[in-house]
Amino acid sequence: MADGSSGLVAFITSGITPLQLERLFVQPYAVVAILRSLPPLARHILLRFSCTGGTVSTATVSTWGGSDGQGKLAAALEELEALRLLIQAACKGQAVYTIHASFQAQLRHAMCSGLLAGHAATLPPRASVPDAGILAAYARQQWEALLLYLVGGEGTTPVAPPELQAASIDIRGLLVAAGLMAKDERTQRQSITQRGFQFLLADLYSQLWGVVRQYLSGLEAQASDGAGGGDLAVAINFLLCLGLQEGCNVMCHGQLGDAEKAIAAHMCQLGLLLPVAGGGELWLHPTRLAAVLAGGGRGGEAVAAQEDGYVIVESNFRVYAYTTSAVQVAVLRVFVRCDVLLPNLFVGTITRDSATSALGLGITSEQMVAFLRQHAHPRAAARVPTVPSVVADQIRLWQQELTRLQMHSAMLYDKFESQELYIGAVEHARQLGALLFRCDKRMQLAVPAALHGAMRTHLQERKRALGL
Amino acid sequence: MVKATAGVLVTGDVALIEFIRWLNESQLPAERFIINGSLDDTHLFIKESKVEFVQKKVDEWQQSLRFEPSAREHQ
Protein backbone atom coordinates (compact mmCIF):
# COMPACT_ATOMS: atom_id res chain seq x y z
CA MET A 1 0.00 0.00 0.00
CA ALA A 2 1.88 3.02 -1.22
CA ASP A 3 0.44 5.57 1.16
CA GLY A 4 3.88 7.08 1.13
CA SER A 5 3.44 8.77 -2.22
CA SER A 6 2.00 11.36 0.13
CA GLY A 7 4.42 13.96 -1.14
CA LEU A 8 3.07 13.46 -4.63
CA VAL A 9 -0.58 13.29 -3.54
CA ALA A 10 -0.27 16.36 -1.36
CA PHE A 11 1.20 18.10 -4.40
CA ILE A 12 -1.81 17.02 -6.44
CA THR A 13 -4.42 18.17 -3.98
CA SER A 14 -2.83 21.48 -3.06
CA GLY A 15 -0.02 22.30 -5.46
CA ILE A 16 -1.67 22.50 -8.88
CA THR A 17 -4.39 24.57 -10.43
CA PRO A 18 -8.00 23.32 -10.39
CA LEU A 19 -7.93 23.06 -14.17
CA GLN A 20 -4.98 20.68 -14.08
CA LEU A 21 -6.68 18.77 -11.29
CA GLU A 22 -9.70 18.14 -13.49
CA ARG A 23 -7.48 16.78 -16.23
CA LEU A 24 -6.16 14.30 -13.70
CA PHE A 25 -9.60 12.82 -13.19
CA VAL A 26 -9.28 10.79 -16.37
CA GLN A 27 -6.06 9.12 -15.25
CA PRO A 28 -6.77 5.86 -13.40
CA TYR A 29 -3.82 5.89 -11.02
CA ALA A 30 -4.41 9.52 -10.06
CA VAL A 31 -8.03 8.74 -9.25
CA VAL A 32 -7.10 5.88 -6.95
CA ALA A 33 -4.32 7.90 -5.30
CA ILE A 34 -6.67 10.82 -4.63
CA LEU A 35 -9.28 8.47 -3.24
CA ARG A 36 -6.75 6.90 -0.88
CA SER A 37 -5.51 10.25 0.33
CA LEU A 38 -8.94 11.49 1.45
CA PRO A 39 -10.16 11.06 5.03
CA PRO A 40 -12.46 8.02 5.62
CA LEU A 41 -15.79 9.87 5.60
CA ALA A 42 -15.06 11.64 2.32
CA ARG A 43 -13.93 8.35 0.82
CA HIS A 44 -17.18 6.71 1.94
CA ILE A 45 -19.27 9.46 0.39
CA LEU A 46 -17.44 9.18 -2.94
CA LEU A 47 -17.87 5.42 -3.05
CA ARG A 48 -21.58 5.77 -2.41
CA PHE A 49 -21.83 8.33 -5.17
CA SER A 50 -20.00 6.12 -7.61
CA CYS A 51 -22.66 3.44 -7.24
CA THR A 52 -25.50 5.82 -8.04
CA GLY A 53 -26.47 7.45 -11.30
CA GLY A 54 -24.22 10.36 -10.45
CA THR A 55 -26.75 12.82 -9.05
CA VAL A 56 -28.18 12.67 -5.56
CA SER A 57 -30.41 15.26 -3.99
CA THR A 58 -29.12 17.26 -1.05
CA ALA A 59 -31.93 16.05 1.12
CA THR A 60 -30.91 12.41 0.63
CA VAL A 61 -27.28 13.21 1.32
CA SER A 62 -28.12 14.86 4.61
CA THR A 63 -29.93 11.75 5.76
CA TRP A 64 -26.70 9.80 5.44
CA GLY A 65 -25.40 11.29 8.63
CA GLY A 66 -26.85 10.72 12.07
CA SER A 67 -27.96 13.68 14.16
CA ASP A 68 -24.57 14.11 15.85
CA GLY A 69 -22.63 13.49 12.65
CA GLN A 70 -24.04 16.37 10.63
CA GLY A 71 -21.08 18.62 11.34
CA LYS A 72 -18.57 16.06 10.12
CA LEU A 73 -20.71 15.29 7.10
CA ALA A 74 -20.87 18.95 6.16
CA ALA A 75 -17.09 19.29 6.54
CA ALA A 76 -16.45 16.26 4.33
CA LEU A 77 -18.84 17.56 1.66
CA GLU A 78 -17.07 20.92 1.69
CA GLU A 79 -13.73 19.25 1.20
CA LEU A 80 -15.01 17.31 -1.79
CA GLU A 81 -16.49 20.45 -3.29
CA ALA A 82 -13.16 22.24 -2.89
CA LEU A 83 -11.50 19.48 -4.90
CA ARG A 84 -14.21 19.82 -7.58
CA LEU A 85 -15.23 16.22 -7.07
CA LEU A 86 -18.77 17.12 -6.08
CA ILE A 87 -20.69 19.99 -7.61
CA GLN A 88 -23.77 21.48 -6.11
CA ALA A 89 -26.42 22.51 -8.59
CA ALA A 90 -30.14 23.00 -8.94
CA CYS A 91 -32.08 20.43 -10.89
CA LYS A 92 -35.85 20.62 -11.37
CA GLY A 93 -36.18 22.97 -8.44
CA GLN A 94 -34.20 20.72 -6.05
CA ALA A 95 -30.65 21.17 -4.85
CA VAL A 96 -28.55 18.21 -5.93
CA TYR A 97 -24.96 17.03 -5.67
CA THR A 98 -23.32 15.70 -8.81
CA ILE A 99 -20.09 13.74 -8.85
CA HIS A 100 -17.50 14.52 -11.53
CA ALA A 101 -18.40 12.26 -14.44
CA SER A 102 -14.95 11.06 -15.54
CA PHE A 103 -13.88 10.53 -11.92
CA GLN A 104 -16.89 8.32 -11.38
CA ALA A 105 -16.19 6.36 -14.56
CA GLN A 106 -12.54 5.77 -13.61
CA LEU A 107 -13.52 4.82 -10.07
CA ARG A 108 -16.01 2.26 -11.30
CA HIS A 109 -13.46 0.84 -13.71
CA ALA A 110 -10.86 0.58 -10.95
CA MET A 111 -13.31 -1.09 -8.60
CA CYS A 112 -14.53 -3.62 -11.14
CA SER A 113 -11.41 -4.52 -13.05
CA GLY A 114 -8.53 -3.42 -10.87
CA LEU A 115 -5.53 -1.28 -11.76
CA LEU A 116 -3.25 -3.87 -13.28
CA ALA A 117 -5.55 -4.65 -16.16
CA GLY A 118 -4.54 -1.52 -18.04
CA HIS A 119 -0.87 -2.35 -18.14
CA ALA A 120 1.37 -4.86 -19.83
CA ALA A 121 0.42 -8.44 -19.15
CA THR A 122 3.57 -9.59 -20.91
CA LEU A 123 6.95 -9.75 -19.24
CA PRO A 124 10.40 -9.31 -20.71
CA PRO A 125 12.41 -12.46 -21.50
CA ARG A 126 14.15 -13.75 -18.40
CA ALA A 127 17.61 -13.47 -19.86
CA SER A 128 17.37 -9.74 -20.39
CA VAL A 129 16.26 -8.88 -16.85
CA PRO A 130 19.20 -7.05 -15.26
CA ASP A 131 20.26 -8.15 -11.82
CA ALA A 132 20.02 -5.93 -8.77
CA GLY A 133 23.69 -4.94 -8.97
CA ILE A 134 23.37 -3.42 -12.42
CA LEU A 135 20.20 -1.54 -11.47
CA ALA A 136 21.83 -0.13 -8.34
CA ALA A 137 24.99 0.86 -10.21
CA TYR A 138 23.02 2.69 -12.90
CA ALA A 139 20.87 4.53 -10.36
CA ARG A 140 23.91 5.51 -8.33
CA GLN A 141 25.82 6.68 -11.40
CA GLN A 142 23.01 8.94 -12.65
CA TRP A 143 22.10 10.37 -9.26
CA GLU A 144 25.69 10.97 -8.27
CA ALA A 145 26.38 12.75 -11.54
CA LEU A 146 23.62 15.15 -10.58
CA LEU A 147 24.92 15.64 -7.05
CA LEU A 148 28.50 16.01 -8.25
CA TYR A 149 27.42 18.76 -10.61
CA LEU A 150 25.55 20.41 -7.75
CA VAL A 151 28.63 20.39 -5.53
CA GLY A 152 31.26 21.25 -8.10
CA GLY A 153 29.47 23.46 -10.59
CA GLU A 154 31.30 21.87 -13.46
CA GLY A 155 31.43 18.55 -15.17
CA THR A 156 28.69 16.78 -17.03
CA THR A 157 25.15 16.39 -15.85
CA PRO A 158 23.42 13.02 -16.32
CA VAL A 159 22.09 12.43 -19.83
CA ALA A 160 19.18 10.39 -21.08
CA PRO A 161 20.14 7.02 -22.56
CA PRO A 162 20.41 7.41 -26.34
CA GLU A 163 18.23 4.43 -27.21
CA LEU A 164 15.16 6.26 -26.00
CA GLN A 165 15.59 9.08 -28.52
CA ALA A 166 14.00 11.78 -26.45
CA ALA A 167 15.04 15.26 -25.41
CA SER A 168 16.85 15.47 -22.06
CA ILE A 169 15.85 17.64 -19.14
CA ASP A 170 17.98 20.72 -18.71
CA ILE A 171 19.47 19.68 -15.38
CA ARG A 172 21.37 22.95 -14.92
CA GLY A 173 18.23 25.01 -15.39
CA LEU A 174 16.29 22.70 -13.08
CA LEU A 175 18.80 23.13 -10.26
CA VAL A 176 18.79 26.90 -10.64
CA ALA A 177 14.99 27.01 -10.69
CA ALA A 178 14.87 24.91 -7.52
CA GLY A 179 17.08 27.44 -5.77
CA LEU A 180 19.87 24.93 -5.25
CA MET A 181 22.35 26.69 -7.48
CA ALA A 182 22.85 30.29 -8.42
CA LYS A 183 24.12 31.50 -11.73
CA ASP A 184 26.75 34.21 -11.60
CA GLU A 185 25.85 36.65 -14.38
CA ARG A 186 29.37 37.80 -14.90
CA THR A 187 31.23 34.51 -15.20
CA GLN A 188 28.22 32.45 -16.33
CA ARG A 189 29.22 29.75 -13.87
CA GLN A 190 26.81 28.11 -11.51
CA SER A 191 27.65 27.55 -7.88
CA ILE A 192 25.84 25.97 -4.97
CA THR A 193 23.69 28.02 -2.61
CA GLN A 194 22.78 27.68 1.04
CA ARG A 195 19.68 25.74 0.17
CA GLY A 196 21.85 23.55 -1.99
CA PHE A 197 23.98 22.62 1.03
CA GLN A 198 20.90 21.75 3.03
CA PHE A 199 19.67 19.68 0.09
CA LEU A 200 22.96 17.74 0.05
CA LEU A 201 22.60 16.81 3.69
CA ALA A 202 18.97 15.75 3.41
CA ASP A 203 17.87 12.14 3.10
CA LEU A 204 17.47 10.49 -0.29
CA TYR A 205 13.67 10.70 -0.35
CA SER A 206 13.67 14.47 0.28
CA GLN A 207 16.28 14.97 -2.42
CA LEU A 208 14.40 12.84 -4.96
CA TRP A 209 11.08 14.44 -4.19
CA GLY A 210 12.63 17.93 -4.36
CA VAL A 211 13.98 17.32 -7.87
CA VAL A 212 10.83 15.57 -9.11
CA ARG A 213 8.65 18.31 -7.73
CA GLN A 214 10.71 20.95 -9.48
CA TYR A 215 10.41 18.92 -12.68
CA LEU A 216 6.59 18.79 -12.29
CA SER A 217 6.48 22.54 -11.64
CA GLY A 218 8.48 23.04 -14.82
CA LEU A 219 5.94 20.98 -16.75
CA GLU A 220 3.15 22.98 -15.19
CA ALA A 221 4.81 26.23 -16.25
CA GLN A 222 5.12 24.85 -19.79
CA ALA A 223 1.47 23.84 -19.69
CA SER A 224 0.32 27.28 -18.66
CA ASP A 225 2.34 28.72 -21.53
CA GLY A 226 0.13 26.65 -23.77
CA ALA A 227 2.71 24.14 -24.94
CA GLY A 228 1.30 20.72 -24.14
CA GLY A 229 -1.37 20.90 -21.47
CA GLY A 230 -1.83 17.24 -20.89
CA ASP A 231 1.80 16.61 -20.00
CA LEU A 232 1.51 17.35 -16.31
CA ALA A 233 -1.45 15.04 -15.85
CA VAL A 234 0.31 12.30 -17.78
CA ALA A 235 3.51 12.78 -15.77
CA ILE A 236 1.70 12.54 -12.46
CA ASN A 237 -0.14 9.46 -13.60
CA PHE A 238 3.10 7.85 -14.71
CA LEU A 239 4.79 8.53 -11.39
CA LEU A 240 1.84 7.20 -9.45
CA CYS A 241 1.87 4.14 -11.65
CA LEU A 242 5.46 3.48 -10.56
CA GLY A 243 4.34 3.70 -6.99
CA LEU A 244 0.98 2.02 -6.89
CA GLN A 245 1.77 -1.10 -8.86
CA GLU A 246 2.88 -3.82 -6.53
CA GLY A 247 3.67 -6.71 -8.84
CA CYS A 248 4.99 -6.52 -12.43
CA ASN A 249 6.74 -3.20 -12.23
CA VAL A 250 8.43 -3.52 -15.55
CA MET A 251 7.03 -1.40 -18.33
CA CYS A 252 7.27 -1.93 -22.04
CA HIS A 253 8.48 1.19 -23.80
CA GLY A 254 6.60 0.46 -26.98
CA GLN A 255 3.25 0.36 -25.20
CA LEU A 256 3.51 3.84 -23.69
CA GLY A 257 1.90 6.90 -25.21
CA ASP A 258 4.06 9.68 -26.70
CA ALA A 259 3.93 11.97 -23.70
CA GLU A 260 4.62 9.03 -21.43
CA LYS A 261 7.68 8.13 -23.52
CA ALA A 262 9.13 11.60 -22.99
CA ILE A 263 8.55 11.39 -19.27
CA ALA A 264 10.02 7.89 -19.14
CA ALA A 265 13.15 9.22 -20.86
CA HIS A 266 13.43 11.95 -18.22
CA MET A 267 13.03 9.44 -15.43
CA CYS A 268 15.80 7.35 -16.98
CA GLN A 269 17.98 10.43 -17.01
CA LEU A 270 17.42 10.90 -13.28
CA GLY A 271 18.17 7.25 -12.63
CA LEU A 272 14.68 6.10 -11.65
CA LEU A 273 14.28 3.72 -14.60
CA LEU A 274 16.77 1.61 -16.52
CA PRO A 275 16.10 0.85 -20.17
CA VAL A 276 17.10 -2.64 -21.25
CA ALA A 277 16.52 -4.19 -24.65
CA GLY A 278 15.04 -7.66 -24.59
CA GLY A 279 13.04 -9.78 -27.02
CA GLY A 280 12.88 -7.05 -29.64
CA GLU A 281 11.32 -4.55 -27.27
CA LEU A 282 12.71 -1.94 -24.91
CA TRP A 283 11.82 -2.61 -21.29
CA LEU A 284 11.98 -0.10 -18.46
CA HIS A 285 13.00 -1.45 -15.08
CA PRO A 286 12.43 0.67 -11.98
CA THR A 287 15.51 1.06 -9.81
CA ARG A 288 15.92 1.53 -6.07
CA LEU A 289 15.37 5.25 -6.50
CA ALA A 290 11.85 4.65 -7.83
CA ALA A 291 11.14 2.44 -4.82
CA VAL A 292 12.33 5.15 -2.43
CA LEU A 293 10.22 7.80 -4.16
CA ALA A 294 7.14 5.61 -4.10
CA GLY A 295 7.79 4.37 -0.61
CA GLY A 296 7.60 7.87 0.76
CA GLY A 297 10.78 7.76 2.77
CA ARG A 298 9.63 5.39 5.46
CA GLY A 299 10.06 1.88 4.07
CA GLY A 300 12.57 2.93 1.43
CA GLU A 301 14.87 4.52 3.99
CA ALA A 302 15.29 1.48 6.14
CA VAL A 303 16.43 -0.54 3.13
CA ALA A 304 18.69 2.25 1.94
CA ALA A 305 20.39 2.63 5.28
CA GLN A 306 21.31 -1.03 5.52
CA GLU A 307 23.05 -1.13 2.18
CA ASP A 308 24.54 2.31 1.93
CA GLY A 309 25.82 3.27 5.35
CA TYR A 310 29.47 4.26 5.30
CA VAL A 311 30.16 6.71 8.13
CA ILE A 312 31.57 5.85 11.56
CA VAL A 313 31.66 8.63 14.16
CA GLU A 314 33.73 8.15 17.29
CA SER A 315 33.43 9.91 20.61
CA ASN A 316 36.78 11.61 20.07
CA PHE A 317 35.12 13.49 17.18
CA ARG A 318 36.89 11.42 14.54
CA VAL A 319 34.90 10.53 11.44
CA TYR A 320 35.77 7.56 9.25
CA ALA A 321 33.89 7.12 5.98
CA TYR A 322 34.39 4.06 3.79
CA THR A 323 33.58 5.50 0.41
CA THR A 324 35.02 5.91 -3.04
CA SER A 325 32.47 8.44 -4.19
CA ALA A 326 33.61 12.02 -4.71
CA VAL A 327 30.15 13.32 -3.87
CA GLN A 328 30.04 11.70 -0.47
CA VAL A 329 33.49 13.04 0.36
CA ALA A 330 32.46 16.52 -0.79
CA VAL A 331 29.34 16.42 1.38
CA LEU A 332 31.32 15.35 4.42
CA ARG A 333 33.89 18.07 3.86
CA VAL A 334 31.15 20.66 4.32
CA PHE A 335 31.22 20.16 8.07
CA VAL A 336 34.13 17.77 8.77
CA ARG A 337 37.78 18.74 8.52
CA CYS A 338 39.52 16.24 6.25
CA ASP A 339 42.65 14.75 7.78
CA VAL A 340 43.42 11.87 5.45
CA LEU A 341 41.92 10.92 2.10
CA LEU A 342 42.69 7.41 0.91
CA PRO A 343 41.26 5.79 -2.24
CA ASN A 344 38.55 4.05 -0.26
CA LEU A 345 38.60 5.83 3.09
CA PHE A 346 38.00 9.36 4.32
CA VAL A 347 39.36 10.23 7.77
CA GLY A 348 38.37 13.50 9.34
CA THR A 349 37.67 15.35 12.56
CA ILE A 350 34.69 17.46 13.52
CA THR A 351 36.29 20.60 14.89
CA ARG A 352 34.81 23.82 16.15
CA ASP A 353 35.97 25.59 12.98
CA SER A 354 34.50 23.06 10.59
CA ALA A 355 31.20 22.93 12.49
CA THR A 356 30.85 26.69 12.85
CA SER A 357 31.64 27.27 9.17
CA ALA A 358 28.86 24.83 8.30
CA LEU A 359 26.53 26.55 10.77
CA GLY A 360 27.43 29.81 9.11
CA LEU A 361 26.27 28.34 5.78
CA GLY A 362 22.84 27.86 7.28
CA ILE A 363 23.00 24.16 8.05
CA THR A 364 21.52 23.37 11.46
CA SER A 365 23.03 21.04 14.04
CA GLU A 366 20.00 18.78 13.66
CA GLN A 367 20.71 18.34 9.97
CA MET A 368 24.32 17.44 10.59
CA VAL A 369 23.51 14.88 13.26
CA ALA A 370 20.67 13.45 11.17
CA PHE A 371 23.01 13.07 8.20
CA LEU A 372 25.58 11.20 10.29
CA ARG A 373 22.90 8.99 11.75
CA GLN A 374 21.28 8.17 8.42
CA HIS A 375 24.46 7.20 6.65
CA ALA A 376 25.93 5.27 9.57
CA HIS A 377 27.97 2.21 8.73
CA PRO A 378 26.09 -1.02 9.55
CA ARG A 379 28.61 -1.83 12.31
CA ALA A 380 28.14 1.58 13.89
CA ALA A 381 24.39 1.57 13.36
CA ALA A 382 24.06 -1.39 15.71
CA ARG A 383 25.32 0.66 18.64
CA VAL A 384 22.95 2.97 20.55
CA PRO A 385 23.19 5.93 20.15
CA THR A 386 24.56 5.76 16.61
CA VAL A 387 26.23 9.13 16.82
CA PRO A 388 27.94 9.45 20.25
CA SER A 389 26.01 11.80 22.47
CA VAL A 390 29.12 13.91 23.15
CA VAL A 391 29.42 14.70 19.47
CA ALA A 392 25.73 15.45 18.97
CA ASP A 393 25.57 17.61 22.09
CA GLN A 394 28.73 19.49 21.23
CA ILE A 395 27.46 20.41 17.76
CA ARG A 396 24.27 21.66 19.37
CA LEU A 397 26.26 23.70 21.88
CA TRP A 398 28.34 25.25 19.11
CA GLN A 399 25.13 26.31 17.44
CA GLN A 400 23.86 27.85 20.68
CA GLU A 401 27.11 29.77 21.07
CA LEU A 402 26.51 31.56 17.80
CA THR A 403 23.22 32.94 19.14
CA ARG A 404 24.50 33.70 22.63
CA LEU A 405 24.44 37.44 22.16
CA GLN A 406 21.36 38.92 20.53
CA MET A 407 20.95 42.54 19.59
CA HIS A 408 17.80 44.37 18.50
CA SER A 409 17.51 47.98 17.50
CA ALA A 410 14.83 49.11 19.96
CA MET A 411 13.06 51.93 21.79
CA LEU A 412 12.86 51.87 25.56
CA TYR A 413 9.79 53.44 27.21
CA ASP A 414 10.30 54.63 30.75
CA LYS A 415 8.61 56.82 33.39
CA PHE A 416 5.03 55.81 32.76
CA GLU A 417 2.64 58.12 34.62
CA SER A 418 0.40 55.36 35.83
CA GLN A 419 0.23 51.60 36.18
CA GLU A 420 -2.77 51.36 33.82
CA LEU A 421 -0.95 53.21 31.08
CA TYR A 422 1.94 50.75 31.40
CA ILE A 423 -0.31 47.67 31.34
CA GLY A 424 -2.20 49.04 28.34
CA ALA A 425 1.03 49.68 26.49
CA VAL A 426 2.30 46.15 27.22
CA GLU A 427 -0.93 44.65 25.91
CA HIS A 428 -0.78 46.73 22.75
CA ALA A 429 2.82 45.70 22.17
CA ARG A 430 1.94 42.06 22.64
CA GLN A 431 -0.88 42.33 20.13
CA LEU A 432 1.50 43.81 17.59
CA GLY A 433 3.81 40.87 18.29
CA ALA A 434 6.51 43.38 19.20
CA LEU A 435 7.19 42.95 22.93
CA LEU A 436 10.97 42.72 23.38
CA PHE A 437 11.40 43.44 27.07
CA ARG A 438 9.26 44.41 30.03
CA CYS A 439 10.03 45.11 33.66
CA ASP A 440 6.97 45.45 35.86
CA LYS A 441 8.89 46.68 38.92
CA ARG A 442 10.38 49.71 37.21
CA MET A 443 7.58 49.99 34.58
CA GLN A 444 9.85 49.81 31.54
CA LEU A 445 8.99 48.51 28.11
CA ALA A 446 11.02 47.90 24.93
CA VAL A 447 9.74 47.44 21.39
CA PRO A 448 11.56 47.28 18.05
CA ALA A 449 12.54 50.69 16.70
CA ALA A 450 10.41 50.24 13.58
CA LEU A 451 7.20 50.22 15.65
CA HIS A 452 7.96 53.41 17.57
CA GLY A 453 5.41 55.41 15.57
CA ALA A 454 2.59 52.96 16.28
CA MET A 455 3.41 52.83 19.98
CA ARG A 456 3.58 56.64 20.24
CA THR A 457 0.13 57.13 18.73
CA HIS A 458 -1.24 54.40 20.99
CA LEU A 459 0.27 56.05 24.10
CA GLN A 460 -1.10 59.48 23.16
CA GLU A 461 -4.60 58.07 22.70
CA ARG A 462 -4.47 56.15 25.97
CA LYS A 463 -3.27 59.22 27.86
CA ARG A 464 -6.12 61.27 26.48
CA ALA A 465 -8.57 58.48 27.35
CA LEU A 466 -7.29 58.20 30.90
CA GLY A 467 -7.24 62.00 31.25
CA LEU A 468 -3.56 62.23 32.18
CA MET B 1 5.33 62.36 29.66
CA VAL B 2 6.56 58.86 28.94
CA LYS B 3 10.26 58.95 28.10
CA ALA B 4 11.34 57.09 24.96
CA THR B 5 15.00 56.27 24.39
CA ALA B 6 16.48 54.89 21.20
CA GLY B 7 19.20 52.29 21.39
CA VAL B 8 20.02 48.64 21.05
CA LEU B 9 18.55 45.97 23.30
CA VAL B 10 21.12 43.30 24.14
CA THR B 11 19.89 39.89 25.29
CA GLY B 12 22.14 37.17 26.61
CA ASP B 13 22.87 34.87 29.53
CA VAL B 14 23.91 36.19 32.94
CA ALA B 15 27.65 35.67 32.46
CA LEU B 16 27.68 37.50 29.15
CA ILE B 17 25.73 40.47 30.54
CA GLU B 18 28.09 40.64 33.50
CA PHE B 19 31.05 40.72 31.09
CA ILE B 20 29.50 43.57 29.13
CA ARG B 21 28.94 45.47 32.35
CA TRP B 22 32.57 44.98 33.31
CA LEU B 23 33.57 46.20 29.87
CA ASN B 24 31.45 49.28 30.44
CA GLU B 25 33.05 49.97 33.81
CA SER B 26 36.55 49.69 32.39
CA GLN B 27 35.86 52.39 29.82
CA LEU B 28 36.44 56.08 30.42
CA PRO B 29 33.29 57.86 31.63
CA ALA B 30 32.95 59.56 28.24
CA GLU B 31 33.08 56.24 26.37
CA ARG B 32 30.53 54.36 28.44
CA PHE B 33 27.75 52.82 26.40
CA ILE B 34 25.16 51.33 28.74
CA ILE B 35 22.10 53.55 28.99
CA ASN B 36 21.18 53.61 32.65
CA GLY B 37 17.89 52.60 34.14
CA SER B 38 17.41 49.53 31.97
CA LEU B 39 19.51 46.92 33.67
CA ASP B 40 18.24 43.40 34.22
CA ASP B 41 20.02 40.07 34.70
CA THR B 42 19.70 39.11 31.07
CA HIS B 43 19.04 42.39 29.23
CA LEU B 44 20.94 45.60 28.62
CA PHE B 45 20.30 48.76 26.69
CA ILE B 46 23.32 50.22 24.92
CA LYS B 47 24.09 53.06 22.54
CA GLU B 48 23.81 52.27 18.87
CA SER B 49 27.25 53.65 18.06
CA LYS B 50 28.98 51.11 20.28
CA VAL B 51 27.37 47.98 18.88
CA GLU B 52 30.31 46.80 16.73
CA PHE B 53 32.74 47.54 19.52
CA VAL B 54 30.79 45.42 22.00
CA GLN B 55 30.40 42.60 19.46
CA LYS B 56 34.14 42.60 18.76
CA LYS B 57 35.06 42.55 22.44
CA VAL B 58 32.61 39.73 23.17
CA ASP B 59 34.01 37.68 20.27
CA GLU B 60 37.57 38.21 21.55
CA TRP B 61 36.51 37.16 25.03
CA GLN B 62 34.84 33.99 23.74
CA GLN B 63 37.89 33.21 21.62
CA SER B 64 40.17 33.53 24.63
CA LEU B 65 38.11 30.96 26.53
CA ARG B 66 38.59 28.28 23.90
CA PHE B 67 41.38 25.82 23.61
CA GLU B 68 42.06 24.01 20.37
CA PRO B 69 44.77 21.33 20.31
CA SER B 70 47.11 22.34 17.48
CA ALA B 71 46.36 20.49 14.27
CA ARG B 72 48.97 17.94 13.33
CA GLU B 73 51.01 18.72 10.21
CA HIS B 74 49.73 16.45 7.42
CA GLN B 75 49.94 17.44 3.82
Image (cartoon, coloured by chain):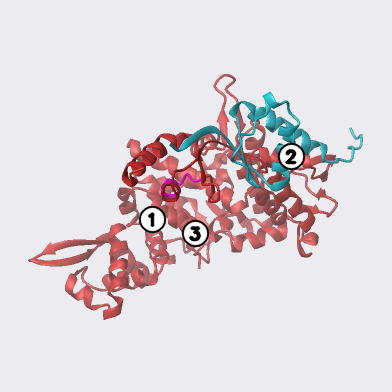
The residues bearing labels 1 and 2 have C-alpha atoms spaced at a distance of: 55 Å
Between marks 3 and 2 in the image, the one whose residue lies nearer the viewer: 2
Rendered cyan, the chain in question is: B
Task: Please tell me how crowded label 2 is: few (under 14), some (14-19), or many (20+) other residues with Cα within 10 Å.
Answer: some
Q: Which residue is mark 1?
A: A13
| A26 to the left or right of A165 | left
Q: Which residue is mark 3?
A: A5
Q: Quadrant of residue A357?
A: top right
What is the quadrant of the C terminus of chain A in the image?
A: top left
Q: Front-most of B21 and A338? A: B21
Q: Front-most of A420 and A170? A: A420
Task: Please tell me how crowded label 1 is: few (under 14), some (14-19), or many (20+) other residues with Cα within 10 Å.
Answer: some
Q: Colour of chain A?
A: red
Q: Which residue is mark 2?
A: B19
In the depicted structure, whether residue A374 falls above or below residue A409: below
Residue at screen point 28% across, 63% down: A78
Residue type at mark 3 is Ser
Sooner in the amino-acid sequence: mark 3 or mark 1: 3
Residue type at mark 1 is Thr
Same chain? Circles 1 and 2: no
Can residue A184 be seen in the rendering of this structure?
yes
Between marks 1 and 2 in the image, the one whose residue lies nearer the viewer: 2
Is A430 one of the magenta-colored residues?
A: yes
Q: Position of residue A454 (x, y in %)?
A: 39, 38
Residue at screen point 59% across, 62% down: A298
Q: Position of residue A51 (x, y in %)?
A: 27, 73
Residue type at mark 2 is Phe
Can residue A279 be seen in the rendering of this structure?
no
Label 2 marks which chain's residue? B
- Tag 2 secondary structure: helix
Q: Quadrant of residue B1?
A: top left
Label 1 marks which chain's residue? A
